[in-house]
Amino acid sequence: MSVRRSRDVSLLVKRAREGDPRAVARLITLVESGDELLPELAATLAPHTGQAQVIGLTGSPGVGKSTTTNELVRLLRGEGRRVGVLAVDPSSPFTGGAILGDRVRMQDHATDSGVYIRSMSSRGHLGGLAAATPQAVRVLEGAGCDVVLVETVGVGQAEVEVASLADTTLVLLAPGMGDAIQAVKAGILEIADVFVVNKADRDGVDATYRDIQGMIGLGERAPGQWRPQVVRAVASRGEGIDDIAAAIDKHRAWLADTGELRRRREQRAAAEVEAIALGALREKLGNLRDGTALPALAAAVAAGETDPYAAARQLLAGLGR
Ligand SMILES: Nc1nc2c(ncn2[C@@H]2O[C@H](COP(=O)(O)OP(=O)(O)OP(=O)(O)O)[C@@H](O)[C@H]2O)c(=O)[nH]1
Ligand SMILES: [Mg+2]
């Protein structure tokens, strides 16, 4: 059977580890669609994961995430590192047009076998993108990527969740978009390890830079806590990319020195386990609701034969089965 349609998880993982991009694509498709093979896939990948550096990029539409990603890929490839890129669209239920744009902007690396670029949407995954993305990151790790870059459009809570799966999260801003204020409102300030004021070739860059520094200054930080770095860039000209990389390295060193890296990863794993468990519970509960258990209990409660707490207890007991 062709790799593109294979359901042989061991074979696919083996091929992916050998660098076959079609096997990687197939595995991510399985993740994206919430395939029933996911538990087996996760188990097969587990021994090969936990080492890659995960970097998140988020920010308003058009702020320059893909352009910056493209430049970071170039830099990382120059260092000989294998790179995976996930462009995650939390808003679209299917793979849409924005993704095409990403392909175009990242096509510099289209023929480089050390780079794997993939767009993702939350087509069918039980826990949505927040649950699917970490699995996709694992696929890329399992396929031998040293660094995984995750790009998400900053349009709501989803990107906060997705960005929080990264070791280091970059939040991109651009002059004149009111981004600094928006960032604070959307709770982005809390997830940003590095702010990139992109499009620094435009008017108003100094004001944006000051705004964001001001916002950071207002935040309370215990001694030794990370203070978000602010870097200017003109991604479309490849300017400031070294500074972004330096800020990422600095954050990486801080993560390692303070034990925060491990703490973050464990926190993430906990969230992931919880999301999967909740997804399974919700599904079971849905089955109960559609079945006979809930209607029967509801009738009993409505008739005063039992109380809602006892009924809920019975319903929960039914979930264990
Ligand atoms: N002037 C200027 N334009 C830039 C800069 N960086 C990126 N652009 C342009 O901004 C546009 C959007 O860039 P993208 O990298 O696609 O932005 P994005 O954040 O990935 O966009 P979405 O994925 O659609 O949210 C493109 O036309 C880029 O060429 C920059 O530093 N200065
Ligand atoms: Mg993009």
Image: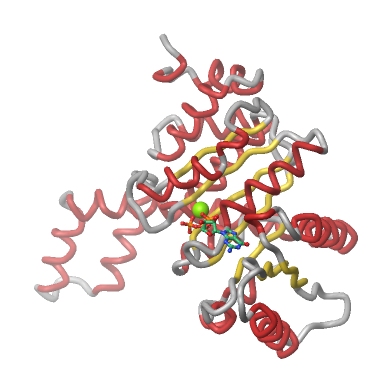
How many marks do you count on the picture?
Answer: 0
Q: Is residue 278 left or right of residue 47?
A: left
- Residue 203's x, y, as percent? 61, 78
- Residue 3's x, y, as percent? 46, 16
Name the residue located 49 percent from the left edge and 62 percent from the top edge: 62
- Residue 268's x, y, as percent? 63, 56
Q: Residue furthest right?
A: 257
Task: Give above or below for 181 relative to 169.
Answer: below
Most foreground residue, 267 or 295: 267
The picture quadrant for ligand 1 comes to bottom right
Q: Residue furthest top?
A: 1
Q: Is residue 124 left or right of residue 153?
A: left
Quadrant, the C terminus: top left
Task: Give above or below for 144 relative to 56.
Answer: above
Task: Give above or below for 145 relative to 188.
Answer: above
Most foreground residue, 140 or 48: 140
Name the residue located 55 percent from the left edge and 65 percent from the top edge: 59
Q: Is residue 35 left or right of residue 116?
A: left
Task: Give above or below for 100 relative to 308.
Answer: above
Quadrant, the N terminus: top left
Name the residue located 57 percent from the left edge and 47 percent from the top edge: 134
The image's colouring method is secondary structure
- Residue 174's x, y, as percent? 59, 71
Name the residue located 42 percent from the left edge and 56 percent from the top edge: 90
